[in-house]
Image: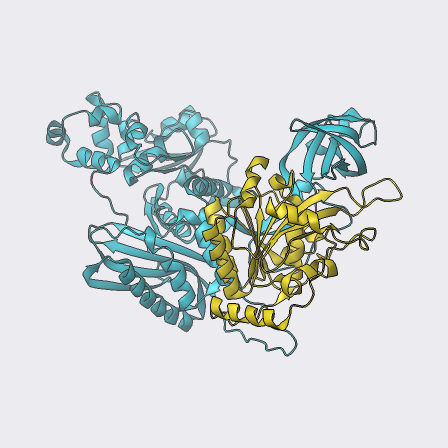
Chain colours: A yellow, B cyan
Amino acid sequence: MSVSAPPAAISELRERIARLEGGNARERTVLPFGVAAIDRVLPGGGLAFGGLHEVAGGGNGSVDGAAAALFAAGIAARAVGKVLWCVTRPDLFAPAIEQAGLPPGRVIYVEAGDEKSVLACFEEGLRGGFGAVVAEIARLSMTASRRLQLAAESSGAIGIAIRRWRRQTEATDFGQPTAAETRWRVSVLPSTPLPVQGIGRARWHVELIRCRAGESADFIVEACDAKGRIALPSDVADRPVQKEIGRRRASA
Amino acid sequence: MWPTDRFRRKSGDAAPRPETPLVLIGRDGRRRVVLAADAAAHAAGLRIGMPASKAQALVPGLIVHDAEPDADEIALERLALWALRRYAPVVAADPPDGIVIDTTGADHLHGGEAAMLNEMVERLGGSGLAARAAIADTWGAAHAMARFGTRRSLVVPSGAIAQAILPLPIAALRLPAVTIDSLRRLGFETIADLAATPRASLALRFGPEPGRRLDQAFGRVSEPIEPIRPEEIVEVRRNFAEPIGAAETIARYTGKLVAELCAELETRGQGARRLDLLFFRVDNRVEAIRVGTATPVRDAKRLTRLLTDKIETIDPGFGIELMRLAATAAEPLRAKQTITSLVEAPEPDVSDVIDILANRVGEDRLYRFAPVQSDVPERSVQRIAPMAPDTGEGWPGHWPRPTRLLPRPEPIETVALLPDHPPVTFTWRGVRRRVKRADGPERVFGEWWKRDAELAAVRDYFQVEDENGERYWVYRAGDGEDAATGSQKWFMHGIFG
């Protein structure tokens, strides 16, 4: 992992490309994870505000999306302002979301009948003053994601699409390209070992599968605490990040 | 039942008990006859139109009161007004005992026609009115199905009027009692009999009425509903010399009407909670848009946006000659001083987005969760309105809670030591998992102070982790020793992230 500061020529080129891409004069700000290893990989040093980010679960998580939902809740908790959460299946348990740092007063849920209206609500939420908008969707086409990305850019909100499928086999859809800034896969790992009987703090295998203007990587982290922050486990914090695995998954 | 229900409601605590028969009597010419009878009286064999003395002779201890048809009608108007505020923009009283509502353009706020109808019947039932309701393509058919249908609330699918109403008795056709009597004497029993008879001979014998009512029920002639408009509602209207039809034109005039309405609301210091925009078409039909807001609003731009979002649902037909915009529900809205702060930016207002979403997916589909004082997980959350004040309350945070709670606990097969050990293995949805680590039990007692059946009920919750690190929330119904506390079966209740 050696993303050193880019040379001046490259940063100048980037500026020119940014100018070409449109009159989006809003300054790009980011939401850092507060974990140096992750923030170093992300361009700008964190998740971009005014962008669409995709999160999916791995394994059974692609169906239940439990870890992905907590990961998204942690990000939304650290953003400022109210949060809109669009669902089709109302099985989210609010006390758990609160334990990830999002108090019930901050989250407004929309239960839309089908995927299409979830996308419509998602876009509408991104355009109006929410700090973060989370939506649980299965299919996300290029066109739809570009609309969402533009909507997020116009307001500066963080858009998080939790990809959640009906069956595990449908999760191959996650390979399709979208206009999202980053794409994450969060899978559960055995929890932090305790010296006594019981279950310790949950651990996740967080893969950054795709990242615009950045490299993919993967991390082993401890799940969100009560403020929505993830952390590197103490026993792997000193280990170098496994770069090769991330590369292989991204190209698969 | 409307007069007797109203009588009971009016009498409050002094009302006769529901199981005692109650009739209301009045004069029919020189006779005193039963004008209304409640369910108990019907069950006792009393019928409307029966002489009062005969009714009293049939049922000892019958409670008899004088009927007040005029007061009933006024109360019905008030009930119609309630329905207007709550349900739909086009509402009219349908004396003697009905209310007719045009649900077009309004059911989206209540989660669809069937849900709206159920809610309406339940709500009326809760205030002591035994209501029956039906939705059909025409007023006539809905009227018949509500009174003679088999169910308390019923939605007749579009285009299925004929199957629904043909088997009903001819009394369902809103004909005068005399006509029904003579038709019966001639052997007409059901609407099907009447519909199969040549019109000419019917018209010759009974006048145009039976034919007209049949046509209205089947939707062959239009039957506009003249909506009630109470005085205190703020309303603006615009007549068009030339009928308009294009969506852009409608949108432009909607904007003008909203601006007028907002000026009017401002003089009253009010903001709109519900707006009804009615379009009167040249062919005597009314199309309607209804939008609701979470908080009182007087911002013309916002209200126009909400209304114009819905214009595509309007069918202008041959043109619209009159538009009427009314603030059906308005609440006080005072100017608020915005506080400028040097330290932090004010939190952006999201109520306009919430209104847009609520009008798109329905008001009850947009909510926040709030804690309820209950240890039973599925009862510990309630839905509240998205703009309800934030109490800052949360759930007690010291126990882990799963991210996904299954809609209902699913039985699992386990191998577990009794009484207080977590399962060693369990099989859920056909997959067998070996438990590596577990936490628990967290014992949840039934709410015996609310429900007698839960006097001894116990659930022991465990958090278990399998060899892949997937964490689940399982519980055993019962404490593992005493059979009275539950079935001792195991259930899957949630998935941790």
Front residue (pair B326, B306): B306
Q: Is residue A140 left or right of residue B466?
A: left
Residue at 41 percent across and 59 percent down: it is: B306
| Residue A173 rendering spot, x and y as whole percentages | 54, 42
Is residue B475 at all visible to an observer of this figure? yes
Is residue B433 shown above or below B264?
Answer: above
Name the spot of residue B374 as percent of width and height, x first.
70, 44
Q: Residue furthest top?
A: B187
Q: Give the residue drawn at x 22%, y 43%.
A: B222
Residue found farthest to the right: A195
Residue B15 percent across, percent down from the top left: 51, 40
* Residue sitting nearer the eye, B137 or B244: B244
Quarter of the image where one finds residue A229:
bottom right
* Residue A240 vs residue B260, the one in the foreground: A240
Give the quadrant of the C terminus of chain B.
top right
| Residue in the picture at 81% in, 37% down | B437
The quarter of the displayed image where residue B138 is located: top left
- Whether residue B437 sits left or right of residue B269 in the image: it is right
Write down the quadrant of residue A103 in the picture. Answer: bottom right
